[in-house]
Image (tube, rainbow, N blue to C red):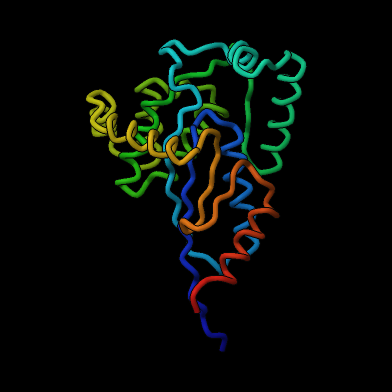
């Protein structure tokens, strides 16, 4: 009879934004890495707020215009990047549905809702639902009805989600946490922290995450 081995506790803190394509790619790569060692870790995810565009107006901005203005990207390079992301997403089980007229939007409300979802133990489920809403279902994740619908889909209370967004009760908390990560020199996302010991910037390949996880396992207390 094989004796069960206790899994190692693994806390993964991820600083990200729900309109960041590389944030969902990075998460999917990490999940791919963890799938190669299913009996090794007991994983707890904690998502932290970062706004790619904190001054984005309520009406948003055309995505192609935004990318050209912010990064100086040519239309040809932008199309190539979207194609690459779509192909990479498909390989990881995530759908990017880029379309003409797609807009970059403000995500401050989304981060407030995610903070509350964390208190309810549904943060990862909501985060993934919001990634899908924006990138896969052409939904505007700055709008309260869209956010509330996503919350309801993952088992959160509609009325409470609506109230939280309407009275902005967690706005100051989210602003303070955003400032804290900026103070820690997080200026680009995704950023991953493992057991508050190892940091991994960007959407790394699964093999990179495997190496970090192996190092964590080797250096864990007996």
Residue 98, by quadrant, is top right
Residue 37, by quadrant, is bottom right
Up the image or down, 60 lies above or below 149; here it is above
Q: Quadrant of the N terminus?
A: bottom right
Q: Nearer the viewer, residue 25 or 186?
A: 186
- What residue do we see at 57% from left, 69% from top? 217
The answer to whether residue 126 is seen in the rendering is no
Q: Nearer the viewer, residue 169 or 163?
A: 169
The answer to whether residue 84 is seen in the rendering is yes
Residue 198 placement, left or right of 99? left
- What residue do we see at 50% from left, 26% from top? 52
Q: Nearer the viewer, residue 28 or 90?
A: 28
Residue 211, by quadrant, is bottom right
Relative image position of residue 90 (x, y in whole percent)? 69, 38
Q: Residue furthest bottom?
A: 1
Relative image position of residue 192 (x, y in whole percent)? 53, 47
């Amino acid at each position: 009879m094989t004796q069960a081995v206790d899994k190692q506790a693994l806390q993964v803190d991820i600083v990200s934004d729900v309109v960041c394509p590389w944030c969902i790619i990075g998460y999917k790569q990490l999940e791919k890495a963890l799938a190669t060692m299913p009996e090794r870790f007991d994983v707890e995810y904690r998502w932290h707020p970062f706004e790619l565009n904190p001054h984005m107006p309520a009406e948003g901005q055309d995505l192609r215009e935004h990318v050209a203005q912010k990064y100086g990207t040519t239309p040809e390079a932008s199309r190539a990047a979207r194609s690459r992301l779509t192909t990479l997403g498909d390989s990881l089980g995530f759908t990017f549905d880029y379309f003409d007229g797609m807009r970059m939007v403000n995500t401050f409300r989304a981060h407030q809702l995610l903070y509350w979802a964390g208190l309810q133990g549904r943060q990862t489920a909501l985060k993934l639902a919001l990634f899908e809403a924006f990138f896969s279902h052409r939904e505007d994740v700055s709008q309260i009805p869209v956010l509330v619908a996503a919350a309801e889909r993952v088992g959160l209370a509609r009325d409470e989600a609506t109230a939280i967004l309407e009275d902005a009760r967690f706005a100051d908390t989210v602003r303070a946490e955003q400032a804290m990560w900026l103070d820690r020199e997080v200026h680009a996302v995704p950023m991953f922290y493992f057991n508050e010991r190892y940091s991994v910037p960007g959407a790394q390949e699964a093999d990179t995450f495997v190496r970090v996880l192996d190092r964590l396992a080797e250096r864990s207390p007996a």
